[in-house]
Image (cartoon, rainbow, N blue to C red):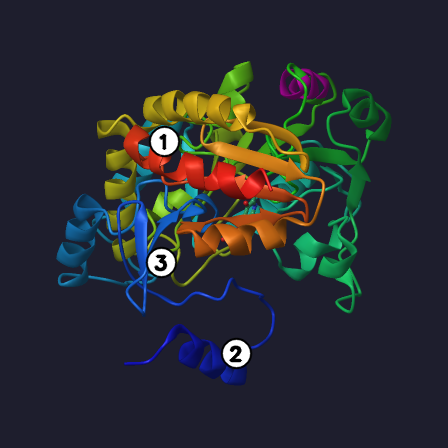
Amino acid sequence: MKSNLDYIKLSERFSARNYLPLPVVLTRAKGCWVWDVEGNRYLDMLSSYSALNQGHCHPVILKALKKQAARLTLTSRAFHNDQMALFLQKLCRLAKYEKVLPMNSGAEAVETAIKVARKWGYYRKKVKKNQAKIIVCKNNFHGRTTTIISFSSESQYRDGFGPFTPGFKLISYNDPDALKRAIDEKTVAFLVEPIQGEGGVVIPDKGYLKECYKICKKNNILFIADEIQTGLGRTGRLFACDYEAVKPDILILGKALGGGFYPVSAVLCDDEIMDVLNPGDHGSTFGGNPLASAVAIASLDVIIKERLVQHAEKMGNWFMKELKKIKGKYIKEVRGRGLLIGVEMKRPARTYCEKLMDSGILAKETHKFVVRFAPPLIIKKSELNWALPRIEDILAR
Ligand SMILES: *Cc1c(COP(=O)(O)O)cnc(C)c1O
């Protein structure tokens, strides 16, 4: 039997060094729990950055995946398949949009939204050719493609990867006036995360999204929400924008849409925007494939049937209240919405995450000083109760 260390050594030999994982090698999972190769059990409080809202290996999604995998997995978009339309219909009805464009990874969906917004800008808003500008926020995280890192404010994400894609303007987050000031006749869209997840669970002031949406409408600019991490129940609403009753012009989803089984992402908007795309304008070999579609249908069904949105709100409110009771001289702030919670420390969070791992809890630092707690939305109060004294023991140090 190989140990954690054996696999880690092997990985270090053959893997690019683009990650610094916690030193644990997982081999099996069920619900909120994962096991390493040495038989140790951990509570997963990261959920693969919210891609596992439904929990690990959910039996309903597993069944759908197995059934579809034995029947038809890939057609490419050169032909129709009998799963994609059903997936798109379900997602449109749930999110209340007229059209969906299915992709695979989150970054691809962001790229897709950028392309749609730019084309809308040229063909509908009549912005001068190749002049379109998209406004984005400092401290954003929208993925890792060359275009997306072109508008990152994180120097490490950009260092060594230029030249960059032009056409983006960075403004401060949580500042509607900055948005007003940044707009000119070339502006086609404002791309924003309703909560900055990777940025350290940064929650804007109440009314921020609504105000920005109004500014966008007044100036004929598309409001694009990246809900790849915050969407599908994570924050205690189906979408984090629901808190302010904002319906984005373009909504970007990913992560939990694949139920932890398969990469599935999507861009949603109404006809008048999606209509700018013509056959051949955009595509993906795997986007909308029948296996992805069947998995996504089951993933959405689980969220609705198990009332995970309501559950996330209830568990999140309670868990955050308990976390706030923890007294520790290095705790700066506890903040969150639903089950997307960050504890900001006064010292680097990595050490705390390593200690949490040793006591059976997997969490990951984000933005250096923040320990993020974002367990699967199926988590039970008893499981959170198991975790709390362990978390307290470590964060109070
Ligand atoms: C994870 C994430 C992405 C990128 O998704 P990938 O599937 O990793 O490409 C984009 N935006 C947000 C807000 C995310 O959390």
Q: Which mark is residue 92?
A: 1
Q: Is residue 388 visible?
A: yes
- Is the CB of mark 1 within 8 Å of ligand 1? no
Residue 146: percent from left, percent from top: 68, 61
Would you say 19 lies left or right of 64 here?
right
* Amino acid found under the numbered disc labelled 3: Arg
Which element carries disc 1, helix, strand or loop? helix
Task: Tell me which secondary structure the magenta stretch mostly adopts.
Answer: helix
Which element carries disc 2, helix, strand or loop? loop
* Amino acid found under the numbered disc labelled 2: Ser
Q: Quadrant of the C terminus?
A: top right
Q: Which mark is residue 15?
A: 2
Residue 42: percent from left, percent from top: 35, 52
Residue 280 lies in the magenta stretch:
no
Nearest the viewer among 138 and 170 is 138
Q: Is residue 151 above or below residue 243?
A: below
- The residue at 45%/21% (across/down) is 317
Q: Which mark is residue 326?
A: none
Sequence-first disc among 1 and 3:
3
Q: Which residue is mark 3?
A: 77
Numbered disc in front, either 2 or 3: 2
Q: Quadrant of residue 218?
A: top right
Would you say 98 lies left or right of 207 here?
left
Sequence-first disc among 2 and 3:
2
Sequence-first disc among 2 and 1:
2
> Distance from label 2 to label 3 (Cα)?
32 Å
Q: Residues within 10 Å of mark 1 (few under 14, many from 20)?
A: some
What are the residue bounds of the magenta stretch?
Answer: 208-215
Nearest the viewer among 76 and 279 is 76
